[in-house]
Image (cartoon, rainbow, N blue to C red):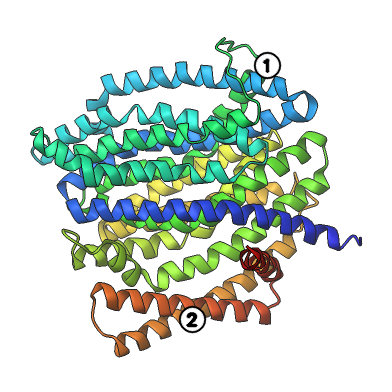
């Protein structure tokens, strides 16, 4: 086999694994959109949804920052090193230690959050105090949902073990349990809450607890099939635990920029017109769709590979794996950005504009989505870059980049929120993600010299060009479809969106061929193999 074939084979393996994770994540995100539909249809965008979104944001902030963020970034390299230089039994003992320590530490945090829920909510959403009953409802919902954090922390640890063993599908599909729990909450538990004399939104909070428990337990059979048996001893001085904590503390700060920015945005949005918190939340949820399907999926399968390369000291392999991940992120997320920005009104109207979610809410959410979309690629690329830094044992650069991003976000928020209202908060988040990404890439040049930076930049420019073709074709198609089938009903929007998406995708594929973007061949090969397997079945 030629040397040129090796990178192609490596890229194909990465893409196949990422495709598997993307499929599971896609199904989960579709259920996530369905749960948002239930929430929007039942409660619209106002008093109850603002309260629920802030209450859910508190444990969710720590989930993204601590559990599924820093924990994965620190645990997977630590566990991979134990598997590389030790035995499977030693890796499983470390897993038990981590789960036991998490139960104690995160359990204590949950108790503190329940006790101090009132000042915590007031810190997150000071504007709610001006509306009678809104702050009190948010505090109560927060106390109900805080235990979700413990469940998700344990689920994230199990996910890390499975990913370190290159078992990707089940961990990626596990969040479906959370979405199912919230959908059940909306459809079944909301009437129960009403019958008990409580606000109906409590049903959604109970659904969060059901879903968190399910996300943890659905992964346990896969863990046991690896031969795992739990040990109950707790040892905070265990070498692996100490190394993980040593990486996790700076990793928490390094990954904090987006979460702190969301916290600041929520705080400031609570001071704007009622509904601003919900518009931003619905728009950010839609942006999370391509980030989860593509960005997080690529990051998930890249992290074990770069961790093994770093553990062996093979920087050429490390650079090749990281470069493959970054190119794949660009190839997948930039056209997704074009799709979201070009078709935002159709997407939001089709998904959310039902029941108490009105056309005005669609327009406001679409404007927030446009502003969030500017930073989508940077957000997804950071998901790949930051864990790669920690696989190298490098903690200072992500921390500095995070602090710079948070500072820039605060300044931009103060400058933009008055003239642009909630749109300014979304735009400042995108700008700070771009700042964070650029700092990380610049600092990487002196640490990973084997990474082909010019090749990455050239591919990025070509993908941007192809994505602009996608956006133009999609806009043209939706304009023609709206003439053929005018209106803003469900059927009209569904046809417009489907036609525009197909035309945009076909145009992107054609432009990728003309611009010679190599990732198109890898994607085509994967889809071809999947098609042949289905045909043979």
Q: Is residue 400 above or below residue 497?
A: above
Q: Is residue 392 above or below residue 497?
A: above
Q: CA distance from mark 2 to mark 1?
A: 55 Å
Question: Which disc, if any, is residue 268?
Answer: none
Residue 238 point in image, percent of width and height: 64, 14
Q: Quadrant of residue 452?
A: bottom right
Q: How would you rate the neighbour count of disc 2 (Cα within 10 Å): few for under 14, some for 14-19, many for 20 or more? A: many
Q: Quadrant of residue 519?
A: bottom right
Label 2 close to label 1 by CB (< 8 Å): no
Asked if residue 66 shows in the view, the reply is no
Residue at image position (35%, 68%) is 347
Q: Earlier in the sequence, mark 2 or mark 1?
A: 1
Residue 168 point in image, percent of width and height: 60, 44
* Residue nearer the viewer, 61 or 120: 61
Q: Is residue 524 above or below residue 172?
A: below
Badge 1 element: helix
Residue at image position (53%, 80%) is 469
Residue designated by label 1 = 239
Quarter containing the N terminus: bottom right
* Residue nearer the viewer, 271 or 491: 491
* Residue nearer the viewer, 319 or 127: 319
Residue 490 point in image, percent of width and height: 26, 72
| 246 horizontally vs 12: left or right | left
Q: Total marks drawn?
A: 2
Badge 2 element: helix
Question: Which disc, if any, is residue 503?
Answer: 2
* Residue nearer the viewer, 274 or 78: 78
């Amino acid at each position: 086999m030629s040397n040129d074939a090796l990178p192609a084979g490596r890229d194909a393996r990465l893409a196949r694994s990422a495709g598997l994770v993307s499929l599971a994540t896609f199904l989960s995100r579709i259920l996530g959109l369905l749960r948002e539909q239930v929430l929007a249809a039942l409660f619209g965008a106002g008093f109850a949804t603002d309260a629920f979104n802030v209450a859910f944001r508190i444990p969710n902030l720590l989930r993204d920052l601590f559990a599924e963020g820093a924990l994965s970034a620190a645990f997977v390299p630590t566990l991979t090193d134990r598997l590389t230089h030790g035995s499977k039994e030693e890796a499983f003992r470390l897993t038990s230690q981590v789960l036991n320590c998490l139960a104690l530490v995160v359990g204590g945090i949950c108790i503190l959050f329940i006790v101090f829920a009132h000042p915590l909510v007031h810190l997150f959403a000071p504007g709610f105090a001006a509306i009678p009953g809104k702050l009190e409802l948010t505090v109560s919902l927060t106390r109900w949902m805080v235990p979700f954090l413990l469940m998700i922390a344990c689920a994230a640890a199990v996910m890390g073990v499975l990913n370190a063993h290159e078992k990707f599908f089940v961990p990626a599909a596990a969040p479906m349990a959370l979405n199912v729990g919230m959908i059940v909450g909306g459809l079944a538990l909301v009437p129960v809450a009403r019958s008990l004399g409580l606000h109906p939104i409590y049903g959604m909070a109970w659904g969060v607890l059901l879903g968190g428990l399910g996300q943890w337990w659905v992964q346990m059979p896969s863990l046991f099939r690896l031969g795992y048996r739990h040990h109950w001893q707790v040892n905070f001085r265990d070498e692996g635990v100490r190394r993980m904590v040593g990486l996790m503390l700076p990793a928490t700060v390094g990954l904090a920029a987006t979460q702190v920015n969301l916290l600041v945005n929520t705080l400031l949005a609570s001071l704007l017109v009622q509904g601003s918190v919900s518009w931003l939340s619905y728009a950010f949820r839609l942006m999370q769709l391509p980030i989860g399907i593509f960005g997080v999926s690529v990051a998930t399968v890249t992290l074990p590979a770069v961790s093994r390369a770093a553990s062996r000291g093979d920087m050429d392999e490390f650079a090749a794996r990281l470069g493959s991940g970054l190119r794949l992120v660009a190839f997948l997320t930039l056209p997704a950005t074009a799709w979201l920005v070009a078709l935002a009104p159709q997407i939001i109207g089709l998904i959310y504009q039902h029941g108490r979610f009105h056309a005005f809410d669609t327009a406001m959410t679409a404007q927030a989505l446009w502003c969030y979309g500017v930073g989508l690629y940077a957000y997804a690329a950071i998901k790949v870059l930051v864990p790669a830094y920690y696989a190298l044992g490098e903690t200072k650069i992500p921390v500095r980049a995070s602090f710079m991003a948070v500072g820039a976000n605060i300044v931009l928020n103060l400058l933009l929120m008055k003239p642009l209202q909630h749109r300014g908060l979304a735009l400042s988040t995108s700008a700070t993600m771009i700042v964070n990404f650029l700092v990380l890439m610049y600092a990487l040049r002196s640490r990973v010299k084997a990474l082909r930076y010019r090749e990455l930049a050239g591919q990025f420019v070509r993908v941007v060009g192809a994505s602009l073709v996608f956006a133009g074709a999609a806009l043209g198609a939706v304009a023609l479809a709206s003439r053929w089938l005018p209106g803003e009903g469900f059927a009209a929007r569904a046809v417009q969106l489907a036609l525009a998406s197909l035309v945009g995708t076909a145009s992107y594929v054609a432009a990728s061929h003309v611009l010679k973007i190599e990732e198109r061949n890898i994607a085509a090969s994967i889809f071809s193999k999947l098609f042949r397997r289905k045909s043979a079945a």
